[in-house]
Image: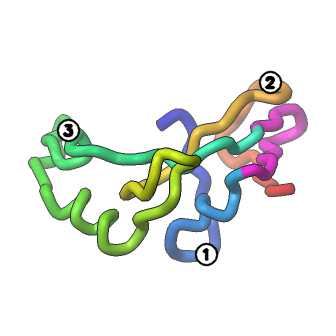
Amino acid sequence: MNIIVDTKVEGFVENDWVNRELNIGDEVRLKVSLPDPRCVMTTLAQEELPRDTDVLRTLVRHNKVQVGAAGQFPCAGVYAVVEASGIIRLGDPVGVN
C-alpha cells in the first residue's frame, strides 16, 4: 500500500474509482487502472498482527470483482498510474473525477 484514503462511505468504494482520476492535494493526479487482486499473502502474519485466514475469505465473500479480462478475484485496493506527480501530505483532500 502506498496511499490510504479515509472515506466517509463504508465498503469497497475504490471499486468505483476504476477508469477515473484521483486528485490528491494541489498537484497529484492518479489514473486508477485496476482493482487490486489479493492472494494468500493477505493471511500471513505481519509484524505484530497474527496469521488470519479470514482476511482472504472475507474478500472472497464480500468483494470478488472482475479484473480486466483475467476474471473475478477477491480484491482490496486499486492500482493507479501517476498522471501528475507531486508531494502528498497527511490530510490532503482527495477528489475523484
Q: Position of residue 67 (x, y in %)?
A: 52, 50
Under mark 1, the amino acid is: Val
Please report whichever mark, 1 or 2, sits nearer to the chain's N-terminal start.
1
Left or right of 5 in this view: 89 = right
Residue pointed to by mark 1: 9
- Whether the magenta-drawn stretch holds residue 12 is answered as no
In the image: residue 24, left or right of residue 76: right
Question: CB of mark 3 within 8 Å of CB of mark 1?
Answer: no
In this picture, residue 10 sits left or right of residue 25: left
Question: What is the secondary structure assignment of the residue under circle 3?
Answer: loop
Marks 3 and 1, how far apart in space? 27 Å
Q: Is residue 70 above or below residue 29?
A: below
**In the image, what residue occupies the spot 72% across and 33% down?**
88
Camera-nearest residue between 28 and 91: 28
Could you tell me residue 20's position as x and y percent?
79, 52
Chain part drawn in magenta: 19-30
Task: Measure how far apart labels 1 and 2 are at the Cα level.
Answer: 27 Å
> Which amino acid type corresponds to the residue marked 3 in the rendered image?
Gln
Q: Earlier in the sequence, mark 3 or mark 2?
A: 3
What kind of element bears circle 1?
loop
Q: Which residue is disc 3 drawn over?
A: 46
- Residue corresponding to mark 2: 86
